[in-house]
Amino acid sequence: MPTPPEQTFAAYQEHLGRGHQLLARGDAKAALAAYRAAAELADERPLPHVLVGRALLALNRAAEALAAFERALERAAADPSALAGKAEALLRLGRRDDAAAVRQQLDDAAAAATAALAAAAASLPPAEAQALAAERAWQEGRHQAAQAEWLAAARTHAADGHIDAALDACQRALIVDAGAPRVHLEMCRLYIAAGLERQAVERMLLLTRLTELEQLDDVRQALAALAAEHAELDPRLSDLADRLSAPPPA
């Protein structure tokens, strides 16, 4: 019996999330396995292939990384993350002229993105304009700005009812920082909207630990409200809401 699409999508998201966490901890080998598992479930998407390439670069396996970035580009010919990864892989392989050509292609894509952004209000849906802004910021090394734009794109996609696209935007935001609390909060909401209740509860419990570490009052309050609103999903959420709503100790 084939696996239902919603279960496949949930597993895909779990593999990506685990890969982000493992790569952030420096375990590139385990992250590679997680990203490859995601790519097997969603071979048509460029993102998991880009992430496979990033993990392979972290393992100094440039030739394999190049093949992964090529697979991503077969699925999205102008994907900036795939182009940047391909250029880096070529450079590590000593193919400087080829790397320069890809960097030029990336610069051309960035220039096109800048032009597109200038006309975004008239010609692009808001989520696409935000994604372009995120990619541009990422290539310029403004990683926090890129994360903010991807998160904005996720919220726009969600408001339009495009939950899959919203979750993909969140996964790209987590490339910047796998522990970003506001991104995880948005993913909690998105998992609930997608009917992925177990994943939503697990992420809310994870986010509780993140808010305790970083002392983010706004995220803490939003999480308390979300847990209270959906307490029927799991008995732990009621206790979680009460704990988060309690005033901090003096």
Image: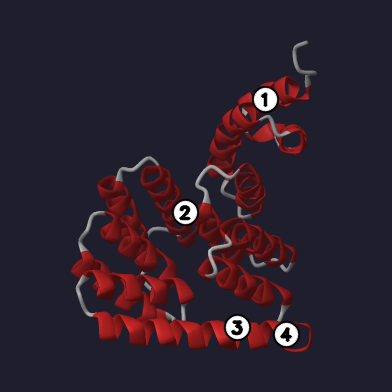
In 3D space, how far apart are the residues under numbered discs 2 and 4 (Cα atoms)?
Answer: 33 Å
Q: Amino acid at mark 1?
A: Leu
The residue mark sitting in front, 2 or 4, is 4
Q: Amino acid at mark 3?
A: Ala
**Upstream in the sequence, badge 3 or badge 4?**
3
The residue mark sitting in front, 1 or 4, is 4
Q: Amino acid at mark 2?
A: Gln
Mark 4 is surrounded, within 10 Å at the Cα level, by few (under 14), some (14 to 19) or many (20 or more) other residues, namely: few
Quick check: can you spot residue 42? no
Q: Secondary structure at mark 4?
A: helix
Its colouring scheme is secondary structure
**Upstream in the sequence, badge 1 or badge 4?**
4
**Residue 180 in the image: x percent, y percent?**
58, 45
Position of residue 248 in the picture relative to residue 102 (left or right): right
The residue wearing badge 4 is 118
**Residue 76 in the image: x percent, y percent?**
44, 81
**In-front residue for pair 166/111:** 111
Quick check: can you spot residue 230? yes
**Upstream in the sequence, badge 3 or badge 2?**
2
Q: Secondary structure at mark 2?
A: helix
In 3D space, how far apart are the residues under numbered discs 3 and 1 (Cα atoms)?
Answer: 43 Å
Does the CB distance between marks 2 and 4 fall below 8 Å?
A: no
**Upstream in the sequence, badge 3 or badge 1?**
3
**Residue 144 in the image: x percent, y percent?**
61, 55
Q: Residue 236: which quarter of the image?
A: top right
Position of residue 60 in the picture relative to residue 234 (left or right): left
- Which residue sits furthest top? 250
Does the CB distance between marks 1 and 4 fall below 8 Å?
A: no
The residue wearing badge 3 is 113
On residue 13, the disc is: 2
